[in-house]
Image: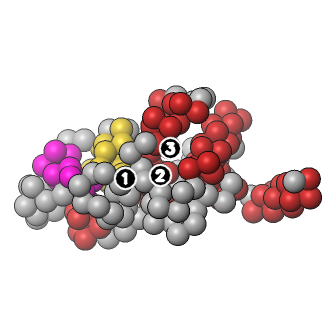
Amino acid sequence: MRIRVNGQDHELDVDPSMPLLWAIRENLALTGTKFGCGVAQCGACTVHLDGQPVRACVTPIEAVQGREVTTIEGIQSNQDGDPALHAVQAAWIEKQVPQCGYCQSGQIMSAVALLANNPNPNDKAIDDAMSGNICRCGMYPRIRSAIKHAASLQSTGVQTFDPNASASATSKEMQHG
């Protein structure tokens, strides 16, 4: 089977019915995509297939031939192709979204797809797009805040994370409640 992941072609000798998740993790060693429930209910395994979020745990590898798969590892680059955080990743850090972190790659992939289709989503659009992603830590308000922040970062062209700027902003937020 020939598949294209993160802009690179790969030839895999696997059963065509193998879930994409296992091909990504086991055969390509891209472990950012997580196994959660195995039945497409939790969203931890979310990747993009031709830019749309799909659950890799139930997507057979034969269904991705001739299509572009993007994993969490594939969203990190700037316009020059150099490694950089995506605006969603930067917002996740700035808004301190992760707690346990297990669901985060799936959450981020869903958020990236949302913002690609809707650069300025309202709360309902965010809730609808993210409804298939479960966060057992209950960080939904932070996730919504981070998506709105990522939208503003994208609209201004900012796609990298400056820890000093974040520390300064966090310090000011703490001082002013």
Q: Position of residue 10 (x, y in %)?
A: 23, 58
Give the position of the C terminus as an image quadrant.
bottom right
C-alpha span from label 1 to label 3: 12 Å
At label 3, which amino acid type do we have?
Ala
Is residue 168 visible to us here? no
Which residue shows up at 23% across the image and 55% down it?
Answer: 39
Q: Is residue 14 left or right of residue 127?
A: left
Q: Is residue 145 left or right of residue 133?
A: right
Question: What residue is pinned by disc 2?
Answer: 107
Q: Is residue 49 left or right of residue 109?
A: left
Question: What residue is pinned by disc 1?
Answer: 43
For residue 111, which numbered disc appears in the image?
3
At label 2, which amino acid type do we have?
Gln
What span is colored magenta in the figure? 56-65
Q: Position of residue 38 (x, y in %)?
A: 24, 60
> Is residue 61 a member of the stretch shown in magenta?
yes
What element does badge 1 sit on? Answer: loop
Front one among 118 and 11: 118
Verify CB contact (< 8 Å) between mark 3 and mark 2. Answer: yes
